[in-house]
Image (cartoon, grey):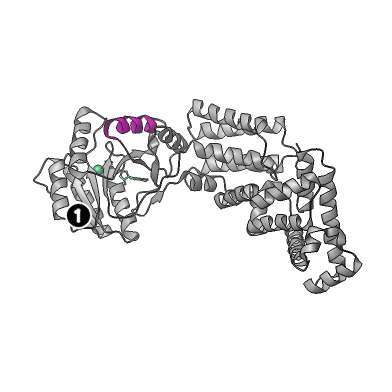
Amino acid sequence: MVLDSLGKSLRGVLQKIARGSAVDEALLSEVVRDIQRALLQADVNVQLTLELTQRVRRRATGEKPPAGASLRDFLIRIIYEEVRNILGKDRPFELKPRRILMAGLFGQGKTTTAGKLARYFQKKGVRVGLVAADMHRPAAVDQLEQLAKKVGCEFYANRAERRAEVIVGEALARFPPHLAVIVDTAGRSGIDRELVEELQRVKTALAPDEVLLVVDAAMGQAAGRSAEAFHKAVGLTGVILTKLDGSAKGGGALSAVSVSGAPILFIGTGEHLDELERFEPTRFVSRLLGMGDIQTLLERFEDLTNKEAAEHAAKAMMSGRFTLRDMRTQLDSLGQMGPFSKILSAFPMFGAGKVDDATLDATQRRLKRFRTILDSMTAEELDHPQVIKAERVHRIARGSGAHPQEVRALLKQYETTRKAAHGLVSNRRLRRQLEKQFGAGEAPAE
Ligand code: GDP
Ligand code: MG
């Protein structure tokens, strides 16, 4: 995978947080140092690295975790967000007939990437027309023609014409309608007036929807300066970073280009036509940090903390008016977050890495049973649990196919929660209590 060693180091940091005995100053300092080392090794700019770790530190000590989240979770989330932020925003890329101008210096992978992009469109059912408008190197025209053959798309070249903008005009007139038109242009060894003027003429002739810069990741941080210069000169809508396979400087290129203002839309990960990947910071960072589906989980996590009902339940707890109905809401919120094991692995607050499968299963089963039992209760019982005496316990047990013992266990758990809430001294204690209640793992150290 791209940026493997950076990913490995960052995953190590997260594990340290999940496994550390306490989230305290010592751990935070260690984590900050580890992140700095990891980013610098991946060639991320020193200033950018320092700013990132300062923000992590400031947020970890200054902000309050959302209700229901432990410090551990919160710290992981902060790191995730900050790393994602230096990689820019997710930008959609539409796969429909559109006009795309490829720009870039010599040897950066422009022609190859034009072919890869053509395949990318065609695979999604959008027909492509490739235009060879690099008239500075005759070989470039042949190269693109070969690629067009492999991809099986339309191709236009005019070897007798020197003016790129004229070729573009001809191509547009000859191509059948409803193609995605991708124009390969000439590079230079540096960004100079000649290059900029040619690009501008081609831009006028093409009226492109996208102006994409192709940059070699091996340039490291210099890729950012290149992107900035091109952006100023011709106005980029996006960047494609090539040769990320095997580049130790990928982190530098990715972060530097991102701060230049033009979003990275694709990354090239090999010489082969299929080795082009869509770049979406959120997904990329999730993969890098080994968090799989964390995006979805974070969204659900947000739902959970925002949900009116959950808030109501929390408020009810604070005021001591916590009912069985509120408990049911809490169980539902947990249930909506998806498979339990998945939640556990994404949220160390539930003790990821410590809980064995048996405990996990037991907790999950117990919560499911509780949910079923609650369904057999009347509205009166849910809202006024004190009315549940022995006779009702038996009725509820029968109705839910549970043993009366289980109903009593539920009532006991409810009672503990209510008492904990009632005698609540601080949010922190509530959190600990809840984490204990809902099973796996230990309460977070603070
Ligand atoms: P151009 O001068 O900008 O058009 O660059 P080319 O498309 O001709 O590519 C220059 C060289 O880089 C070729 O040998 C390509 O095979 C190689 N190349 C392009 N993209 C990638 C990539 O993502 N990974 C690797 N490893 N090589 C690439
Ligand atoms: Mg070329």
Percent of width and height locating residue 278:
41, 49
What residue sits 68% from the left and 41% below the top? 72
| Left or right for 73, reference 182 | right
- Return the residue at label 1: 155
| Left or right for 239, reference 101 | right
Indicate whether residue 105 is drawn in magenta: no
Query: Looking at the picture, does residue 402 appear above or below residue 235?
Result: below
| Left or right for 253, reference 319 | left
* Within-10-Å neighbours for mark 1: few <14, some 14–19, many 20+: many
Indicate whether residue 236 is drawn in magenta: yes
Q: Which residues are magenta?
A: 222-237
Residue placed furthest toward the front: 380
Percent of width and height locating residue 404:
87, 69
Q: For the residue marked with disc 1, what is the amino acid?
A: Phe
What residue sits 48% from the left and 32% below the top? 44
Query: Looking at the picture, does residue 47 appear above or below residue 187?
Result: above
Total numbered badges shown on the rendered structure = 1
